Amino acid sequence: MAGLSIGDAVGAGFGVIRRRPMSVLAWGVLQLAIAAMTLSVFGPFFIDLASQALSNVQASAGSKVPVAMPMSTDMIQRMMGMQSISMLLNLGGVLVRSVIYCAVIRAVLHPEQGRFAYLRIGSAELFVTILTIAAFFVLAFAIIAPMLVIGLIVAGLAAAHAGTAAAIVGILGVIATFVALAYVALRLSLVAPMIVDDGKMHLLDAWALTRRHAGGLFMIALCLFAILIAAEIVIGLLALIVGLGALGSVAGGLPGLRTFFQQPPAAIFSSLTPLLIIGGLVSVPLTGCSFAITGAPWARAYRDLSGPDLAATFS
């Protein structure tokens, strides 16, 4: 069995970007399509909600005591309907991200399968989607349950006037919980690459494959975290500078921003639509690159640990 190369794993995403730039753009376009669909569905609702809130504020402006205006029956019904639509869109978003994530992994493990930007909808994508949803609920329970136990112990110690012991138990309990969760996540971090490799579920195989490699996988995760933080700082500063300049141009200068945002919500959204379109187009390569940078390292780690004959490793 080959060894784990941390440097090669961290750089795997950049290699995918260099070799398959059009695939990276396709991944970004797919994610943008989901975001645009979500905006088109929820945009009119939130515009109407903001308009009603603005009307309530204006109606109570002449009163010394704010007047609470009831929400219309139609708005309440729309809000309830939006909750159901939101659940469907969230599930669709998980599926799309799973499809893209599987495509990134496929680009590393099976570079010859490059048609349609490595995008597929099959058993691998279905398994990864199910595991993602299940992981959300398991993670929530794995955090809440220990926190409740720790909270009860801390409360008991505090009631016994053992403040120092309560603080120590609380801090150590929280640290131990998150260390345990991180360890389990690292041990199962290669599940998705293994699923994409042969279309089968590999929870126990992933646990066995990562034995004695949690430290190396942690270093990969730490490097990726540092890269993402640095990228977010740089991109965030650029977006802030460019965004303020663009808003200023729309509002007729930065001093006019206050007046600009006092307009009806529909007028504000209409004025900002060109900026939203430009921002969406700029996000395409950035989003595609983020998928590649964060997804490819785990596929490369799996390839390193599995050796050259990937198909026969867990046959």
Image (spheres, rainbow, N blue to C red):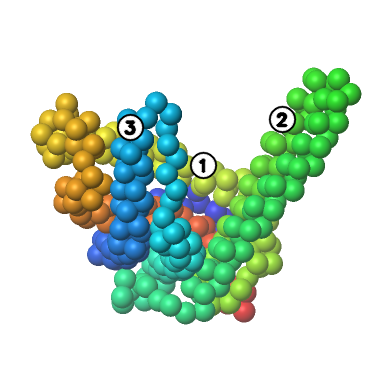
Q: Looking at the rendering, in which quadrant would you find the N terminus?
A: bottom right
**Residue 14 seen by the camera:** no
| Residue at x-position 76% and y-position 42% | 148
Q: Secondary structure at mark 2?
A: helix
Of the pair 105 and 213, the residue shown nearer to us: 105
Q: Secondary structure at mark 1?
A: helix
Q: Which mark is residue 167?
A: none
Pointer 3 residue? 61
Local crowd at mark 1 within 10 Å, few (<14), some, or many (≥20)?
few
- Residue kind at label 1, given as amino acid type: Leu
Local crowd at mark 2 within 10 Å, few (<14), some, or many (≥20)?
few
Circle 1/circle 2 CB separation < 8 Å:
no
> Is residue 91 placed above or below 297 in the rendered structure?
below
Position in image of residue 287 (x %, y %): 33, 54
Position in image of residue 248 (x %, y %): 15, 34
| Residue at x-position 68% and y-position 47% | 143
Of the pair 133 and 182, the residue shown nearer to us: 133
| Residue at x-position 37% and y-position 73% | 119
Quadrant in the picture for residue 239: top left
Q: Secondary structure at mark 3?
A: loop
Position in image of residue 91 (x %, y %): 48, 66
- Residue kind at label 3, given as amino acid type: Ala
Quadrant in the picture for residue 12: bottom left
Q: Which mark is residue 171?
A: 2
Relative to residue 58, is residue 145 drawn left or right? right
